[in-house]
């Protein structure tokens, strides 16, 4: 069965979504990721969707769910690498992915995670 | 394929010189020829070349069809003619008249032959069919040439009106000029997002100094662009909001609170630098500190 790879990058986790997501795969990813966050005591999650040419409301909700779950486990989530065409389609559909932070690429996402984490360490609000 | 049965090919071939003379003379006399745009010599040259090609093609005995290979030379000549006339600003009537006006000298010539009435009528009918087809073909080509000019200009206009410039590494500016409609917004959005990815920029300044009016539709388009950029992880700042436009925005009840707005591009640039953790200091004060 397909699985979405989750790589460890220091105290962060990198999730690279490379195949079209369907219900079962999304469930497995949520399971794997929450387990991995607990196991590795990760503070941040980067979700790379640069290979996705289509993002619908289902994937939008899944991303939101992952962000919320990670937040409960004290990890921040940043979605990186969205394609221009995907962004335009989402806006046209009126889906603005509330509660999800985004960055242009993995580098920018990692930098954003670091600043978010630094702020939250001082008791500030991370979002 | 219809074959020409009449004496038309022979007549055209034998009296080429005479036809050209009367034809050019008539075009010069009629109002359709515009003084100053075309030299008489050029007109004569074109008439001679056209008749030459026509006579050569007529000899093959095949009536005009837009796609028949025998007429390729004539077609090419006509397409070149209508393209150059379209570029020079001639009207479609004037371009088509070039072909239609050939009827008069041709018919005059036919009438002077001692044929019986039926033969003359048949030949005339054939000549009419041929010249009408050629004239309409010319008009069609003229239309195509004009349309290609218009569509090229439209494309250029869209390209020209949406430049994305890099103000600083990581900071893009998008100076919008002219009214924003749905089509343009689409192009603007695409160009901006593509440049964001290409340059890895995290901040985009959208300057609307050149946008004459902002109504609810324009504002919605702006907000869409901002939302799309935010989805990709870039922040947008809208600048160049004139006092009048600020009033309009409030009167219309447009909510721009989700995006940073600045009055001038320089203010927006300063904010963008600050967000990237950069600052600009005067070189004079710096050297004074050092001293």
Image (cartoon, grey):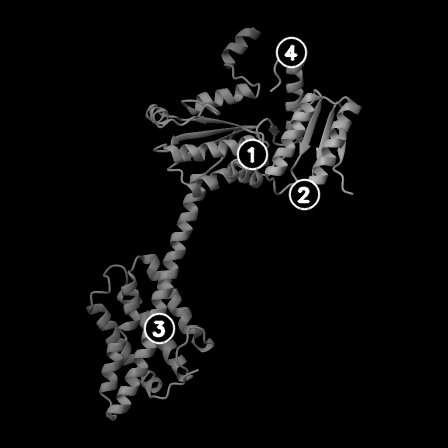
Give the mark nearest the N terminus, 1 or 3: 3
Mark 3, chain letter?
A: B
Q: Distance between the residues labelled 3 and 4?
A: 84 Å
Q: Name the residue under label 3.
A: B134
Q: How many marks?
A: 4
Q: Quadrant of residue B95?
A: bottom left
Circle 1/circle 4 CB separation < 8 Å: no
Q: Can residue B48 be seen in this view?
A: no
Give the mark nearest the N terminus, 4 or 2: 2
Mark 1 or 2, which is nearer the eye? Answer: 2
Q: Residue A116 carries which label?
A: none
**What residue lies at 52% left-to-right and 22% top-to-bottom?**
B272
Mark 2 or 3, which is nearer the eye? Answer: 2
**What residue lies at 69% left-to-right and 40% top-to-bottom?**
A23
Q: Residue A123 carries which label?
A: 4
Q: Where is residue B55 in the image (x, y as percent from the top left)?
A: 37, 80
Q: Quadrant of residue A52?
A: top right
Q: Distance between the residues labelled 4 and 2?
A: 38 Å
Circle 2/circle 3 CB separation < 8 Å: no
Q: How far apart are marks 1 and 3 (CA)?
A: 53 Å
Mark 1 or 3, which is nearer the eye? Answer: 1
Q: Do labels 2 and 3 share a chain?
A: no
Q: Quadrant of the N terminus of chain B?
A: bottom left
Q: Distance between the residues labelled 2 and 3?
A: 57 Å
Circle 4/circle 2 CB separation < 8 Å: no
**Disc 2 secondary structure class:** loop
């Amino acid at each position: 069965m397909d699985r979405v790879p989750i790589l460890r990058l220091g105290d962060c986790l990198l999730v690279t979504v490379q195949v079209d997501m369907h219900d079962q795969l999304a469930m497995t990813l949520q399971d794997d990721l929450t387990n991995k966050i607990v196991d590795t005591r990760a503070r941040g999650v980067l979700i790379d969707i640069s290979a996705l040419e289509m993002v619908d409301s289902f994937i939008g909700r899944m991303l939101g769910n992952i962000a919320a779950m990670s937040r409960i486990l004290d990890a921040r989530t940043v979605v990186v690498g969205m394609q221009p065409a995907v962004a335009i389609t989402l806006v046209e559909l009126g889906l603005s992915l509330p509660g999800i932070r985004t960055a242009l690429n993995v580098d920018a996402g990692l930098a954003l995670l670091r600043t978010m984490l630094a702020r939250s360490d001082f008791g500030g609000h991370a979002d | 394929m219809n074959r020409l049965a009449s004496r038309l090919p022979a007549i055209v071939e034998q009296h080429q010189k005479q036809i050209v003379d009367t034809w050019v003379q008539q075009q010069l006399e009629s109002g359709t020829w515009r003084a100053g745009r075309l030299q008489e010599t050029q007109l004569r040259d074109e008439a001679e070349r056209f008749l030459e090609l026509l006579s050569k093609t007529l000899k093959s005995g095949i009536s005009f069809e837009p796609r028949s290979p025998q007429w390729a030379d004539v077609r090419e000549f006509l397409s070149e003619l209508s393209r150059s006339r379209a570029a020079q600003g001639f009207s479609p009537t004037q371009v088509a008249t070039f072909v239609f006006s050939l009827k008069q000298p041709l018919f005059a010539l036919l009438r002077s032959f001692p044929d019986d009435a039926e033969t003359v009528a048949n030949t005339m009918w054939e000549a009419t069919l041929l010249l009408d087809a050629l004239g309409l073909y010319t008009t069609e080509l003229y239309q195509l040439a004009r349309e290609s000019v218009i569509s090229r200009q439209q494309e250029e206009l869209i390209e020209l009106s949406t430049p994305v410039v890099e103000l600083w590494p990581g900071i893009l500016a998008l100076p919008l000029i002219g009214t924003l409609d749905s089509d343009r917004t689409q192009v603007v959005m695409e160009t901006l997002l593509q440049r964001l990815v290409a340059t890895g920029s995290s901040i985009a300044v959208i300057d609307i100094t050149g946008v004459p009016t902002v109504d609810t539709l324009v504002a919605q388009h702006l907000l869409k662009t901002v939302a799309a950029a935010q989805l990709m992880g870039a922040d947008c700042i809208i600048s160049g909001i004139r006092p009048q436009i600020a009033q309009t925005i409030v009167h219309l009840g447009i909510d721009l609170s989700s995006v940073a707005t600045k009055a001038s591009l320089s203010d927006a640039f300063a904010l963008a630098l600050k967000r990237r953790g950069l600052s600009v200091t005067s070189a004079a004060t710096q050297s004074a500190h050092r001293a």
